[in-house]
Image (tube, rainbow, N blue to C red):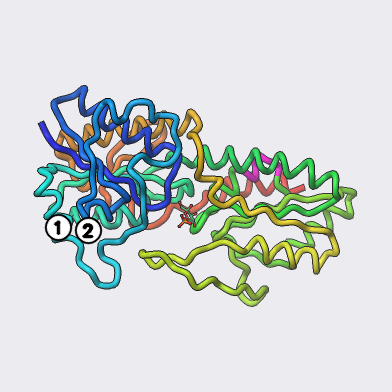
């Protein structure tokens, strides 16, 4: 019998509740374990803000977006602080034997540090951006891709009616997974991603060629982390950062809207999908993946395989060392981009 702590950290993601439910359900099926849910990511562990998680309190949450535990980007090591002592104190006082943080690179980066300091931890990967190493796919990604694809479909009809260029800015800080999958699914005419700095002149030349061939509208999907090739276009970076030092992104779509219209004379509009991509109910694929991750994380804890993260490898759920998973972000497969490029009208 063990007492297991859970937390959800970083940006929320459809499927988080499915993981929480799966950990509690499989834990109760496999033994007399008890569960404590820390509120608002690492903040809940540092400040000892928590609640019991039971069969009853986790019932009915499978299709619900967001996270019943709340989340935050609190970094226990921000500004030179050392949050380990506070975290240890809370875990000892609450009698927690093992911790399962569900999060992305930042949340799991804290997990890796705690693991190195001897805290028993198993991580569950989460991000709609799909850019974490150690897993082929993260839950939440398919939901985001579906939301963006639906938006592109809607933008297509209004673009066509008005003979406009529609720029759609989507999430994707380091990687263009969402932009490329949804762009391919929605029939985008150009997709700009962080992995391939773009030349604005090449983008507009492509749009001109397309319009000269008789098309009267175009769809341009841009990931928020896409940047112009050096020296080709001036973009003023924002100054706001989070507790992990990441810049607050967003705005490249607005720059593109202005530049495309100015350079081509085609009427252009931008849509920034923003947090709509993270909200609402997870699609079935994400519910299944999140449930499998939760069950596998509980198995790893029960077997004492700490310092690991569960992940999808082809069709199997495997454990990988946290260290390996976090070594570098998982960037876009160039062959996928090449496939999408074939359809750039
Ligand atoms: O969840 C990852 C992510 O979606 C990034 O693509 C994006 O830059 C970031 O979250 C924005 O999150 P927030 O505005 O909640 O800090």
Residue 117 percent coordinates (x, y): 14, 58
**With 32 as the anchor, is 255 left or right in this view?**
right
Q: Is residue 183 magenta?
A: yes
Q: Does the magenta stretch include residue 330?
A: no
Q: Is the magenta stretch mostly helix, strand or loop?
A: helix
Q: In this figure, which residue is indicated by the disc labeled 1? A: 117
x 26%, y 65%: residue: 77
Residue 343 percent coordinates (x, y): 72, 44
50, 27: nearer the viewer: 50
Q: Are marks 1 and 2 in contact (CB under 8 Å)?
A: yes
For the image shown, how many numbered marks are present on the structure?
2
Image mark for residue 113:
2
Residue 3 percent coordinates (x, y): 14, 37
**With 225 as the anchor, is 317 left or right in this view?**
left
SS assignment at label 1: loop
146, 272: nearer the viewer: 272
Location of residue 257 by image quarter:
bottom right
Q: What's drawn in magenta, residue-wise? A: 182-187
């Amino acid at each position: 019998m063990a007492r297991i702590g859970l937390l959800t950290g970083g940006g929320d993601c459809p499927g988080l509740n499915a993981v929480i439910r799966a950990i509690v359900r499989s834990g109760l099926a496999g033994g007399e374990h008890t569960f404590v849910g820390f509120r608002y990511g690492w903040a809940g562990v540092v400040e000892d803000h928590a609640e019991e998680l039971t069969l009853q309190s986790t019932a009915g949450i499978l299709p619900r977006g967001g996270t019943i535990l709340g989340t935050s980007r609190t970094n226990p090591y921000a500004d030179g602080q050392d949050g380990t002592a506070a975290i240890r104190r809370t875990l000892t006082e609450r009698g927690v034997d093992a911790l399962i943080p569900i999060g992305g690179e930042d949340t799991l980066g804290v997990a890796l540090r705690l693991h190195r300091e001897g805290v028993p931890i198993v991580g569950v990967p989460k991000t709609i951006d799909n850019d974490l190493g150690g897993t082929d796919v993260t839950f939440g990604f398919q939901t985001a891709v579906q939301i963006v694809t639906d938006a592109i479909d809607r933008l297509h009809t209004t673009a066509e009616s008005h003979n406009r260029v529609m720029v759609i800015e989507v999430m994707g800080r380091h990687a263009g997974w969402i932009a490329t999958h949804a762009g391919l699914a929605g029939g985008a005419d150009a997709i700009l991603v962080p992995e391939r700095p773009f030349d604005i002149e090449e983008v507009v030349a492509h749009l001109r060629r397309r319009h000269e061939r008789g098309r009267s509208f175009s769809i341009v999907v841009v990931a928020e982390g896409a940047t112009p090739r050096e020296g080709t276009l001036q973009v003023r970076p924002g100054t706001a950062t989070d507790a992990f030092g990441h810049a607050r992104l967003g705005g490249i779509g607005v720059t593109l809207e202005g530049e495309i219209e100015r350079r081509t004379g085609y009427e252009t509009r931008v849509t920034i999908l923003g947090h709509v991509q993270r909200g609402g109910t997870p699609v079935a694929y994400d519910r299944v993946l999140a449930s499998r991750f939760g069950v596998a994380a509980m198995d790893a804890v029960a077997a004492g395989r700490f310092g690991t993260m569960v992940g999808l490898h082809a069709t199997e759920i495997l454990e990988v060392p946290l260290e390996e998973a976090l070594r570098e972000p998982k960037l876009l497969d160039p062959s996928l981009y090449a496939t999408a490029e074939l359809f750039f009208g």
